[in-house]
Amino acid sequence: MTLREPDETRLKLRDRIENEILTGAMPPGFRLDEVTLATRFGVSRTPVREALFQLASAGLIEIRPRRGAVVSEVGPERLVQMFEVMAGLEGMAGRLAARRHNGDDREALTEAHAACRLAAETADADAYYYENERFHHAIYAASHNAFLIEQCAALHRRLKPYRRIQLQVMNRVANSLAEHEAVVGAILGTDGEAAERLLRDHIMIQGDRFSDLMASLAERSKRPLG
Amino acid sequence: MTLREPDETRLKLRDRIENEILTGAMPPGFRLDEVTLATRFGVSRTPVREALFQLASAGLIEIRPRRGAVVSEVGPERLVQMFEVMAGLEGMAGRLAARRHNGDDREALTEAHAACRLAAETADADAYYYENERFHHAIYAASHNAFLIEQCAALHRRLKPYRRIQLQVMNRVANSLAEHEAVVGAILGTDGEAAERLLRDHIMIQGDRFSDLMASLAERSKRPLG
DNA sequence: TCAACCAGTCTTGTATACAAAAAATGGATC
DNA sequence: GATCCATTTTTTGTATACAAGACTGGTTGA
């Protein structure tokens, strides 16, 4: 994780713990001890518990009554399911965006796409990762459905670490950019059906690829003396 | 609200408060005072606060820092947006269900549909409301995507009070049943595209109708001296 | 040797106490 | 009579204390 997050200590406790989970500092299965977290962040157990409840609601951790909290284990199967839902939501956002976009939306979308292309051409993986995020958020915004935007952003955020590893591990930047190109065309051409289909496929490819990766990693780690 | 909920006092605090919100006992805008709730439920403020944080994560209430919690106001616009997303998710569940259903799924679906028909024929609105819920959950389950099932169930639950009022106020039972019939046909016939389209429309009709109702109510309440 | 049990420790869940911020109150002034 | 400011009161946010359920390790019995 080389990307700088702004002013760690200023953030609310909930976000600070969330960051540690999303960046992998607290890996899946990691035990979240209340007193340890409390002393580490210099507060008492009360706000820690409140933060943990919120993270549990978001699905990032699991609280077993009287048995403590652990970072959620996300197996390959569940990951595919999450990407499948993400694909559905993004497809929907694309379909609505194609019908509802206005001048501002078009500008934001083309700008974000141009930034993606630049990052791809300069082979800057970190930059592409960032601009890619901006691109997808531009699509969400163009749907003009605030609730959908929230849902997409929340799930996108949850899938963030996986997408990142995947972009780094696999050489998917070129393909990703080509797919973006087609999506932009469909949206600007007000072809909702095409936008939906293209985006759905765009996301599902990520999901399939990533689950393959995870499955192979899990398989390898199971082997004794790997 | 005549439907009996099982063993109120046995439920976790979070669910008890949630029920009061969903049933309308705590209407939108209602102020949730911590000490009042604590004394009412016979506990201290600590568990009350934890419950409130969870409800806030689910979107049922809003916590303004240092300024207390209130039941979320859901205006017509946001309601339409939520129904739009529900339509997208249910359509997706239907599409997947058409491709993935097995014997158990078929049985559950046809059984739920038969129960809906019986309730409609006997003009039992409460029963139809309940069986309708079972029918939709059968579709979610047939998608065989655990994450999608969770998302659908959560949003369905959140829209529950609105759907209920709507079914009671408007005479939509007959139309609803006919739409179910078509959906069952599409799913059993493994026609994913049709199932998606039919379900999407089925939900959106609810959303549009309800938002019309709400808008008119809001409009009327704004007029001075009604 | 191994399983079961019991005491001690640790961790979570809840209550209460205190601090700080927002809201309410009341009085003075214009 | 209305408005503004200071003070009081209420309410939230946090820390701490206590109770009760889970885990640990060792001991005992078969």
Image: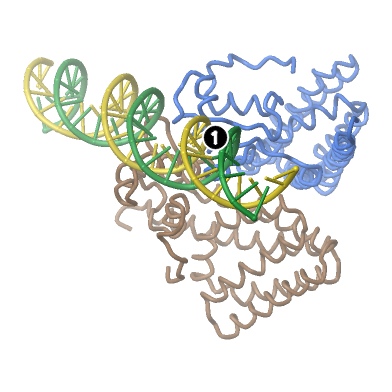
Chain colours: A blue, B brown, C yellow, D green
Q: Circle 1 sits on which residue? A: A52
Q: Is residue A133 visible?
A: yes
Residue B225 in percent (x, y) is at: 29, 56
How many numbered marks, from 0 up? 1
Looking at the image, residue A62 lies above or below residue B86: above
Q: At 65% across and 39% down in the image, what residue appears?
A: A149
Quadrant for the C terminus of chain B in the image: bottom left
- Which residue type carries mark 1? Leu
Residue B196 in percent (x, y) is at: 77, 60
| Nearer-the-camera pick, A30 or A185 | A30
Count neighbours of disc 1 (C-alpha within 10 A) and say few if under 14, some if 14 to 19, many if 20 or more.
many
| Nearer-the-camera pick, A185 or B169 | B169
Looking at the image, residue B41 lies above or below residue A101: below
Residue D15 in percent (x, y) is at: 38, 23
Give me the chain letter of mark 1.
A
Q: Is residue A98 visible?
A: no
Q: Is residue B210 left or right of residue B103?
A: left
Q: At 54% across and 69% down in the image, what residue appears?
A: B167
Q: At 86% across and 67% down in the image, what residue appears?
A: B190
Quadrant for the N terminus of chain B in the image: bottom left
Q: Quadrant of residue A37?
A: top right
Residue A192 in percent (x, y) is at: 80, 46
Say which element carries label 1. Answer: helix
